[in-house]
Image: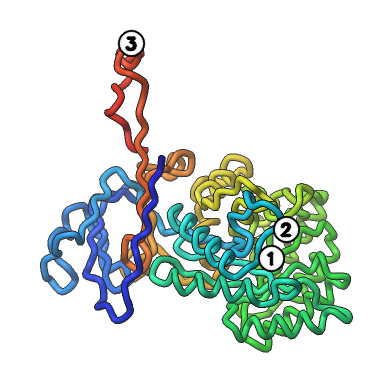
Amino acid sequence: MPDSRPQPSPPPGRPSEPALLLCGARLTDGRTVDVRLGGGRIEAVGTAGSLAGTTAAGTAVGGGARVDLSGYLLLPAPAEAHTHADTALSADADGPVSYAPEDVQLRATEAALLQLGHGATALRAHVRVGDVQGLGALAAVLEARRSLRGLAEVTTVAVPRVLTGVAGADGLAVLRDAVKMGACVVGGCPDVDPDPAGYVEAVLEVASEQGCPVDLHTDADDPARLARLAAMAGGLRPGVTLGPCGGLARLPVDMASRTADQLAAAGVTVVCLPQGGCGGAEGRDTAPVGLLRAAGVRVAAGSGALRDVSNPVGRGDPLEAAYLLASRHGLRPEEAYDAVSASARAALGLPEVRVEAGFPAELLAVRGDRLAGALSLAYSRIVVHQGRVVARTSAVREYCDSATATELGLPRQGRGKPS
């Protein structure tokens, strides 16, 4: 079984980590390189063996500061663009989902570590506010975020239920309090409000007041509503994200194309959820990613539900999302991986990552030598956040007993092959 062991974060006041040397990694362009990390960034990239033994200051790299990546493909780390931290890992619970703060904090922490083990060093977590849970679930997720500092970067989206009518006044007050408490993004689901346009107006107003990004959840297949939402959101800075937009897949192609053009003109990012979404069974369509990309819309991909009532078998694995985009939606492996890495980071407002000097040291090493193979079968992974190895997953495949293996011409048991 894969064994993922995130390392503990450094205690407060600890001196900066020494330089770390990643040796013999393969890049997607076919080169085999050494990569030196320091100060949370990539200091240098050179041909294999050229950086061995020294840091940027010319001093020797001490023991324990090397990681052998022979046989691994080195990539920019993925980011998780859409997850639900307050309900994650609740599918097996008896009865309704518990929003008790201690339960939410435990589940949110465990879910983030699971996703970190898959490679996601940054996550955007949607959290319901108001109604029965008030601000308790948000407080719990923010506490989980603090406990994960140094391992993964977690941002939170405050998701109120109703923002219009008589009940809307309470929802608006709670949304503003959520931002004051520490929610980084304002969002929600206009589809469940009696006045979807009014809901969006309220969210955009709060976002404008607070200088926050917006992340709205919609699966509507009403092109007029999506067009109006795009027009309302257009020009808002620091930007608007919509997801999962599965309703676009149910529209005629010409109608969906016009809507995609309107989304592109508004500068809206779409986060699709190819692993099954986070709504009811009727909302499991994946947005038409090829059509959106052709229109110029930035398309990122997220995991959505992680083993909750919406998807009790959700894995929270960005590489699975990329695999599905390539295998079911026609994207090239490079385009599919971009959706869970570069485009996902851009949707979260994070700086770009490349395996080049000067870029943030947010990296994922997967066993294999080509991206297509990594997306189809990548169990062994090494995750780097802020220049430190924070998680390792190691898998070994073993075959049958010695006699049968000999008969079949297979390696004997105990001589497993890493995957």
Q: Does the image show residue 344?
A: no
Judge whether 70 appears above or below 400 on screen.
Answer: below
Secondary structure at badge 3 equals helix
Judge whether 12 appears above or below 127 on screen.
Answer: below
Q: Residue furthest front?
A: 94
Tell me, yes or no, whether the two marked residues, 2 and 1, touch with CB atoms within 8 Å: yes
Secondary structure at badge 2 equals loop
Measure the C-alpha gap from mark 2 to mark 1.
7 Å
Residue at 27% of width from left, 49% of height from top?
69
Measure the C-alpha gap from mark 3 to mark 1.
56 Å
Amino acid residing under circle 3: Glu
Amino acid residing under circle 1: Leu
Q: Which residue is mark 1?
A: 242
Measure the C-alpha gap from mark 2 to mark 3.
53 Å
Q: Which residue is mark 3?
A: 407
Q: Quadrant of the C terminus?
A: top left
Q: Which residue is mark 2?
A: 245
Residue 309: x and y in percent read 69, 52
